[in-house]
Amino acid sequence: MTSPLTAPVGDDALAARRSAATERLGGAALPAVDEEVWRYSRVGELDLERWAIPERADGVPDAVESLLSSLGHLAGAVVVRDGSVVATRLDERFVAAGVFLGAATAHRGGVDALGSVIGDGPDVFTVLNDARGAAPVLVDVPRGVVVDAPIVVVDWISTADVAVHPRLVVRLAVDAEATVVEWRGSADVAALSVPVCEIDVDRAARLRHVVVQDRGPGVWEIATTSARVGVDGSVSVVQAGLGCDYGRSRVDCRLTGRGASGDLDAVYFATGNQTLDYRTFQWHDAPDTTSNLLFKGAVDDDARSVYTGLIRVEREARGTNAFQTNRNLKLSERAWAESVPNLEIETNDVRCSHASTVGPIDADQLFYLESRGVPTETAQRLIVAGFFDEVLEHVTVPSVAALVTEAIARRLGERP
């Protein structure tokens, strides 16, 4: 699998963009927890001065090589190490079809794609990413091209006490189709990660986007994903939250074309003193649009989880169907989960609902298994594993679903 890159053509444009963002950053402040979208967060603990900008990295870590091997057949892969692109490959079939995968600076006009969906972003962290991101990655699929195997982007942190600012732009032209897996991992180091992902799905295009956050326990991550979906297009974003000391993910799914659809799903499992924090926005800007959200999480030990979500239906968005469900299991008396779903509807002729639950393992399910001779600890593990299955079925890359399932099983097996 090879894809020779042309000489960078966007270095000057990227430098200009970073300079402008640095100016904006000078007058910006970190958000406060009294802002609704940051309520219950740990942003007040963040000290940006603690983290250094990493030097340019080289080489693919052994752990990443092993991960890529375990994922099976891939259409292409990019490895970003400590903020630098260190490897890129793409099947020659897709190179010939005009697919681009690699550093945005190596694609004519690639830097112009930065901000095309997210603009200046919802908060200071998008500006921070613009100012300090060194190697944005672009996935560009031309009109009518179907990429029939996953494209994987691995973002890996190897160095302690650094701040990385990964940027990924995924663009699908009219009637294109692709699956993109974003895997965020690290060595056992303390670090800060501020990823931004922009997704642009044109008319009748189909994107399946899978994000696995499996950082080490010393990492803080504040991530933003923003998707825009055109007429009759569809996007599916499935997240798995496993790692980090504090891991935050904001997802905005904006349905701008008639008949557009967006599915948002997540599984997350926090243990120890972890905090996993999810904020979602389902924006319905056009008629006959559909969004479905299903987030399922578990918290154990002294861990915390946060979910807040908003469905917003604009006046023009008649015929909207929008659904939002968040379910949480508390596996310890000390664990804590917050769930706040919201609706804002500006028109009639819509079908919208939201639901949330926070509670322990269902006593009836536990009794049923115990009454048939299943030991209590085994029964608890079976119930929790089954709880996540509904979301894991939406992970359309079987090898990724298997790795996430194994990670959850390991956590369940470590419970006292």
Image: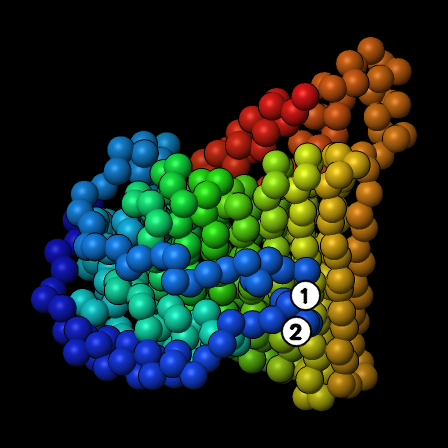
Image quadrant in which you'd find residue 69: top left
Residue 171 location (% of width, % of height): 38, 69
Q: Amino acid at mark 1?
A: Arg
Residue 119 location (% of width, % of height): 44, 81
Q: Is residue 212 left or right of residue 158?
A: right
Q: Residue at x 54, y 52 (%)?
A: 247
Q: Secondary structure at mark 2?
A: loop
| Mark identifier at residue 323 | none
Image quadrant in which you'd find residue 73: top left
Q: Is residue 413 above or below residue 73?
A: above
In the displayed image of the protein, which residue is found farthest to the bottom?
315
| Residue closer to the observer: 21 or 285 | 21
Q: Is residue 362 left or right of residue 179?
A: right
Q: Amino acid at mark 2?
A: Glu
| Residue closer to the observer: 27 or 324 | 27
Q: Secondary structure at mark 1?
A: loop
Q: Residue at x 68, y 60 (%)?
A: 40
* Quadrant of the image containing the N terminus: top left
Residue 380 location (% of width, % of height): 75, 25
**Residue annotated with mark 2:** 35
**Residue annotated with mark 1:** 39
Number of numbered tags placed on the structure image: 2
